[in-house]
Amino acid sequence: MVRIEPWGKGNVALLEKCLADPAMMQHLGGPETPEKIAERQTRYEQPGSKQHRIVDEATGEGVGWVGYWDREWQGDEIYEIGWAVIPAFQGRGIASAATLQAVAIARAEGTRRFLHAYPSVENGASNAVCRKCGFDLQGTYDFEYPKGHPIVCNDWRLDLLAPG
């Protein structure tokens, strides 16, 4: 179905499809600027960035992004995970499949106990991915994302030490 591979230099057009589209970013404060996307691309393409391109195995086409990063949350060092699948490929279980592959990589690293996702309470599709992938709902929290844009998010947590 899909595989994930490390983000590379040639993936900026896919990042633009994920982050510059108002529909894709409706739960995250709106589309990102070209400058912000270029800055992300530079970070994502670095070896060891933990950011991955989601690839449709049948066509080899990039259909989205999944990645995780270090974060401090409530006094603990955790991983936060995020994902995006371009509209033409949504509704096929791709986000869940790619997220589970990223979870397996994070679990194999063995450096963090917990992986968290923080989708907007209004983002039904991303909350469904969390449920499908075995995350446990911890509660709701107020965030600012991007800075100055209030958002209410669910805190979903996955124990990376639990059997996969």
Image (cartoon, rainbow, N blue to C red):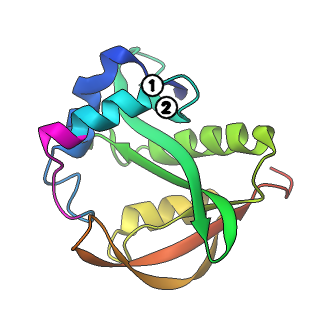
Indicate whether 75 appears above or below 128: below
Going 24% across and 44% down the picture, which residue do you hit? 19
- Where residue 156 appears, as percent x and y from the top left, is 58, 70
Q: Judge whether 72 appears above or below 38 on screen.
A: below
Question: Dot 2 corresponds to which residue?
Answer: 52
The number of numbered discs placed on residues in the rendered structure image is 2
Up-down relation of residue 116 to residue 69 (above or below): below
Disc 1 is placed on an element classified as loop
From the top left corner, tell me how far across and down residue 25 is, in percent. Answer: 22, 56
The spot of residue 163 in percent (x, y) is 86, 53
Residue 137 in sight here: yes
- Residue 120 in percent (x, y) is at 37, 72
Can you identify the residue that label 1 sits on?
7
**Residues in magenta?**
29-36
Q: Is residue 35 magenta?
A: yes
Residue type pointed to by label 2: His
Tell me the residue at 48%/64% (across/down).
Answer: 128
Residue 88 visible? The answer is no
Given contact means CB atoms under 8 Å apart, are the residues at marks 2 and 1 in contact? yes
Query: Label 1 sits on what residue type?
Result: Trp
Residue 15 disc label: none
Assign the magenta stretch its main secondary structure.
loop
